[in-house]
Every structure is written in structure tokens, then in C-alpha cells.
Image (cartoon, coloured by chain):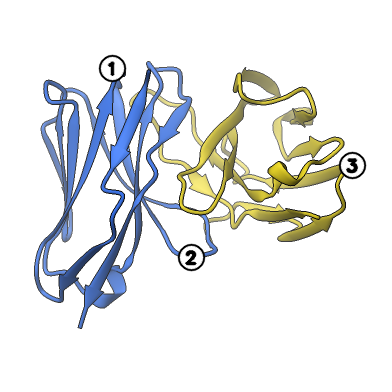
Chain colours: A blue, B yellow
Amino acid sequence: SQKIEQNSEALNIQEGKTATLTCNYTNYSPAYLQWYRQDPGRGPVFLLLIRENEKEKRKERLKVTFDTTLKQSLFHITASQPADSATYLCALDGEGTYKYIFGTGTRLKVLA
Amino acid sequence: DTGVSQDPRHKITKRGQNVTFRCDPISEHNRLYWYRQTLGQGPEFLTYFQNEAQLEKSRLLSDRFSAERPKGSFSTLEIQRTEQGDSAMYLCASSLARAGGGEQFFGPGTRLTVL
């Protein structure tokens, strides 16, 4: 069956460290993969999109990698801050149909 | 504020009642999505529109759910004969249809509680 997996356990890291979140998928061949941030009680907010032919994408303190052979994306936040504490969701297009499938999200807590 | 609005923000209803939610997307966005999200889960795709055409609907969506997007602007999602299992956050998102995928702008959601 088709599946997207993200670290189900919450990730606690110390302020200033790099947070690394994982998104693994099976039985999909996505053309795009997106990362979103979601705060409690609010809708997700778009962060980054990476295409299947891109290995890496950066935006300020954020970096995303995409390995279509491993079927994995990694999301990094460098120099993390308590304000980065949120749930991070990965989403991929279901076989290029613009029907986006979301993972369950990873809750990140950055400790001051 | 992403520019996508949803109304109402909260809805409490009794089992068996019908409910309707509204979504106003960013005006120039031609794609509109509906998702459902329960606690601890990611958003679950329900349906999406390109302009006024409903192009895809989740197989998980029962026939109690219907969505419309008249004139390709705002959209409504109706749930008939609500059940307790329908309790969730209903999210609307809009995007521009363009090559290379497109970021989705989400509204604040409508939280539905079915008693």
C-alpha cells in the first residue's frame, strides 16, 4: 500500500542545534515534495517545495534534500530557535495528479 | 493570515444534522482543495477543484459529502446526516495551477464537533 512516514515521536533539541526531520515514502513516484509547518489550531503554512530532479533546496535556515532512490526527504533547520517549535508535515503529489498526500507530521520542540 | 478564509471557524452539531462550510480562496487561485484533519494526523485529501470543475474526489469520501465551487470562486462543503466520526478540522487550501507544482495556502480551518 502507499504510505508516507514521518518520525512519529516528538523531536526535542537544544536551541542553536540543527534539527533534522525525515519523510519516507513507499509506492509513490512523486514529481514534487513539499514541507509545511503547522502550529496548534491553525492551518499548515508552506515552507519549501523540491522537485524530483533536484537534490537539495535551501531557504534561509531551512534545507530540504530529496533522494528518489531511497524514497526519502530530509528537512533541516539550522541554528534552531524556540520559535521553530511546531509540527512539520511533508506532502507529495499522488503520481502527478496535484492530489497531495500528507504525512502524519513530526512535532519539533526547541528547548531554550 | 494567508488570504484564505473559512466560515464558520467552529461548528457544533447533533448527529444526523446537515452542515455546510464555506471557503473563500485567494482570488487569483484557480485550484481549491478540501482536506480533513484529525488529532495527531496530517491533512487527509477530500477533493479538489480547478476553476469550477471538481477534478478529483477521494475514494474514502462517502456520498454524504458533497462539494461545489460555483463560478470558480468560493467553495462549499456539505456533510449530510453527520456522524460522530465526522468530527475533525476541515481545511481548505488554494493554489495556482502551474507547471512545477504549487504551494498551497491554507485557511484557518473549520472545527466540526458532532455530538
Picture quadrant where residue A64 is located:
top left
Instruction: Check chain identity for marks 2 and 3: say if they share one.
Output: no
Residue at mark 2: A40
Q: Amino acid at mark 2?
A: Pro
Which mark is in front, 2 or 3?
3
**Alpha carbon distance from label 3 to label 1:** 40 Å
Crowd around label 2: few <14 · some 14–19 · many ≥20 (10 Å): few
Tell me: B45 left or right of A92: right
Q: Earlier in the sequence, mark 1 or mark 2?
A: 1
Q: Position of residue A27 (x, y in %)?
A: 30, 17
Q: Amino acid at mark 3?
A: Gly
Asked which secondary structure carries label 1, the reply is: loop
Q: Chain of mark 3?
A: B
Tell me if residue B68 comes above or below residue B93 in the rendering: above
Tell me: A100 left or right of A82: right
Q: Give residue A59's mark.
A: none
Tell me: B72 left or right of B19: left
Crowd around label 3: few <14 · some 14–19 · many ≥20 (10 Å): some
Q: Amino acid at mark 1?
A: Ser
Label 1 close to label 2 by CB (< 8 Å): no
Q: Quadrant of the N terminus of chain B?
A: bottom right
